Image: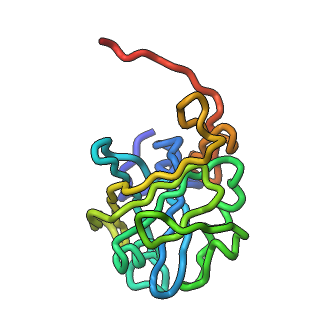
Amino acid sequence: MFYRPEAGHGLPHNPFNAIVAPRPIGWISTRGAQGDNLAPYSFFNAVAYVPPQVMFASTGAKKDRQGTKDSVAQIIETGVFCVNIACGDLRDAVNATSAPLPAGQSEFQAAGLESLSCTTIDCPRVATAAAALECRMTQIVPLAGEANFAVFGVVTGVHLRDDCLVEGRFDPRAAGGWLARLGYKDYCVVQDLFEMERPA
């Protein structure tokens, strides 16, 4: 099968959603004039080591935000955000925070999640997340299409759950494993690991 995206694929569901998978989920928390916000984004990844940097992409818009979603709107307002690492033990809460709540209504409260204050930025974080990356936004890049934005940030602080540190390595299997998006309504939890040595 071959198709051109602009011509359509003719399938019941868009296959592009499942081709690039599994994708880690960045559970983005922000604070703005209207309150705290928390939302999962599966277009998310780390992009550099020194200094450590991450990105996530937001697609689509809400009627109560001008041309974007709550996360991007509040990052534009404050210049900061926190990436909470989503794991299997919080899968239901991650899903609950994807609901399109009105701007200003806290997903932390709606999902019954405890929040803690970040250390280097004025932003909440998920208290029980396996890890949390405090970030200062470096740039927001408009992407092709309507209401598509890539948000880049430099990491200014890192929180690690103590039980996710195993023999000096970050290993969130104690938190249910890394939660990842596969496309459609499908997700997975990464639990099985193997090592490979890179060629010299």
Residue 58's image quarter?
Answer: bottom left
Q: Residue at x 51, y 55 (%)?
A: 132
Q: 148 left or right of 1?
A: left
Q: Find residue 53 and report its horizontal and vertical position in percent.
A: 34, 51
- Residue, x 54% and y 37% (percent of image)? 170
The C terminus: image quadrant: top left
- Quarter holding the N terminus is top left
**Direction top: furthest residue:** 200
Out of 134 and 3, give the one closest to the viewer.
Answer: 134
As drawn, 102 above or below 131: below
Q: Is residue 189 visible?
A: no
Residue 5: name its quadrant.
Answer: bottom left
Residue sitting at x 41%, y 68%: 121
Does the rendering let one see residue 81?
yes
Q: How many marks?
A: 0
Q: State the residue in front, 197 or 134.
A: 134
Q: Nearer the viewer, residue 72 or 135?
A: 135
How far from the left and from the top, in percent, is residue 59?
43, 66
Examine the rendered structure and indicate whether residue 47 appears above or below residue 122: above
Q: Position of residue 83 (x, y in %)?
A: 48, 58
Q: Quadrant of residue 189?
A: top right
The colouring scheme, among rainbow, by chain, secondary structure or one colour, is rainbow
Residue 96 to residue 161: above or below:
below
Q: Position of residue 12 (x, y in %)?
A: 59, 54
Please name the residue shown 33% across and 13% down the image. 199
